[in-house]
Amino acid sequence: MNAPLNAAASGQVVTNPFPVENGELVIGGLPLSRLAARVGRTPFFAYDRALLAAHVRALRAALPPAVHLHYAMKANPMPALVQTMVGLVDGLDLASAGEMKVALDAGCDPGIMSFAGPGKRPEELWQAVAAGVTINVESEGELPHIRAAADGLGVRPRVAVRVNPDFELKSSGMKMAGGPKQFGIDAERVPDVLAAIGREPFEFVGFHVYSGSQNLRAEALCDAQRKTLDLAVRLAAAAPGPVQVLNMGGGFGVPYFPGDQPLDVAPVAENLRMLAEEARTSLPGATLVIELGRYLVAHSGVYVARVVDRKESRGHVFLVTDGGLHHHLAASGNFGQVIRKNYPVAVGTQMGAPATENVSVVGPLCTPLDLLGDRVDLPRADVGDLICVFMSGAYGYTSSPHQFLSHPAPIEVLV
């Protein structure tokens, strides 16, 4: 059964997506204490394979079949997890040559992979051309390097244009389009870039428009998707070939904090269905792609740390763990939060037990920023107990400064 857990001092209750047996969290079919013994030490990130697959399948069932689903590897590039995702989605979106290597090693067809990001190094562009991965061009400065790779390798590169539109994804946690941005090419300059691509021995694939991320408002997503299709149709008139792919980005948010309401996917899926039907006429032959990272993997991961000390200071209890911001920067509040909020936290071996005290869960680092839970209501925890930080499947391990203060790095497992 799933059990509620206290996520903040306000008493906000968040549903735990993992099974619970005998008051203990179960991940990948294993009770937490046994999983910790199998891993060998704490802290660690654990990702539940079955939970991950079920979530992706549920989303695919909601989306129209005409819309393809891609996984944005930057959310979690763990090799075993990526290999699992390859069998669940229609393609992968990469942000570096390092991610490209993981994707190729996982057996992903390079024909369904795309490579985005500003500041691609020349050698990365050569690697992408050699592999046959679609390059999302973000600057005119990338074109000479792609041409050099084409000439040097005798390969016809696949290229798309990442567009910085003149609109943004409203209410998104991180805005990545509209106004001056380092991402993509300003929409008004795209026709000239398309003309330049037409003079090169390239295969034009289409457009990539990524407006923002972490959005919980269906109406905002629908509005951005509508504008994205309209923009692509206008730009297609200047394209050197038919649009094969329109990557509409993602932006689907997940509820991390007290008061967050889960995204209602139904109206977004219906909007995509209508847009896909319209695109059959306005962009004939084009495949619409939704690119998601966090939304696909966040809920399936848990960060687990062990209490190494319990101390009281002026009437307030601190649970000191062997993990912290050097492992999970996002949960500490130092990865994009303006006002710090708590990720959902629980004592993993006391699931469902009443919260009897208000405590702060901290790490071993010599900084007051090292917080995993600030004044959260939890059952009493003592030295040796396991603290779980939920919603940790995305932007956890690889988004954190493991070398800070030279503590050991965490372990990752897919179970």
Image: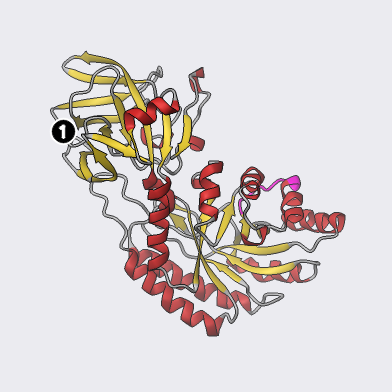
Magenta residues?
116-123
Callout 1 amino acid: Ala
* Prevailing SS of the magenta stretch: loop
Residue 129, by quadrant, is bottom right
Q: Nearer the viewer, residue 345 or 258?
A: 345
Circle 1 — which element? loop
How many numbered discs sit on the rendered protein?
A: 1
The figure's colour scheme reads secondary structure
- The residue carrying pointer 1 sits among few (fewer than 14), some (14 to 19) or many (20 or more) residues within 10 Å by Cα, namely some
Q: Which residue is mark 1?
A: 353
Q: Position of residue 302 (x, y in %)?
A: 37, 38
Quadrant, the C terminus: top left
Q: Nearer the viewer, residue 245 or 413?
A: 413
Q: Kindly identify the residue that appears in the image at 65 percent across and 46 percent down.
A: 105
- Up the image or down, 306 lies above or below 22; here it is above
- Up the image or down, 43 lies above or below 242; here it is above
Can I make out residue 43 in this image? Answer: no
Left or right: residue 201 versus residue 142 is: right
Residue 224, by quadrant, is bottom left
- Up the image or down, 264 lies above or below 412; here it is below
